[in-house]
Image (cartoon, rainbow, N blue to C red):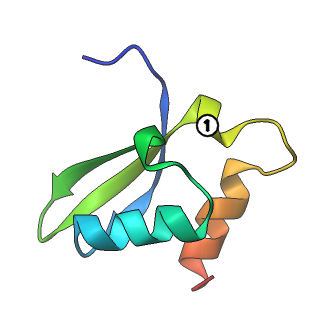
């Protein structure tokens, strides 16, 4: 079990798609976690990786929901 807190970011078709999304949004792959959900995967990002640089986790989630 991890001691990190993660923020759920959404569901993807496969792990490769989740990783591509993370890269496009400048999220280090070491800061993500994926888990199987039905036919796809759920992406979570370590909360501390979201930082306080003005980028809010809601900004990332909204981008995924609206197609970037």
Q: Left of 62 or right of it: where is 53?
A: right
Residue at the extreme left: 39
Q: What number of labels is visible?
A: 1
- Name the residue that disc number 1 marks: 49
Residue 21 drawn at (x, y percent):
48, 70
Residue 53 drawn at (x, y percent):
85, 42
Classify mark 1: residues with Cα within 10 Å, few (<14), some (14-19) or many (20+): some
Establish if 35 lies above or below 31: below
Q: In terms of depth relative to the viewer, which is nearer, 60 or 65?
A: 60
- Which residue is at a point 28% across and 70% down the rendered structure image? 16
- Which residue is at a point 57% across and 53% down the rendered structure image? 27
Q: In terms of depth relative to the viewer, which is nearer, 19 or 60?
A: 19
- Which residue is at a point 73% across and 36% down the rendered structure image? 51
| Viewport quadrant of the C terminus | bottom right
Residue at disc 1, secondary structure = helix
Q: Left of 1 or right of it: where is 18?
A: right
Q: Left of 54 or right of it: where is 51?
A: left
- Which residue is at a point 72% across and 61% down the rendered structure image? 59
Establish if 62 lies above or below 52: below
Q: In terms of depth relative to the viewer, which is nearer, 41 or 51?
A: 51
Q: In terms of depth relative to the viewer, which is nearer, 59 or 27?
A: 27
Q: Left of 40 or right of it: where is 30?
A: right
Residue 57 drawn at (x, y percent):
67, 50
């Amino acid at each position: 079990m991890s001691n990190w807190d993660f923020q759920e970011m959404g569901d993807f078709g496969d792990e490769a798609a989740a990783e591509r999304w993370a890269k496009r949004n400048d999220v280090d792959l070491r800061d993500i976690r994926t888990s199987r959900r039905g036919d796809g995967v759920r992406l979570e990002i370590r909360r501390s990786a979201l930082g306080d640089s003005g980028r809010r986790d809601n900004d990332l989630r909204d981008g995924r929901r609206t197609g970037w």
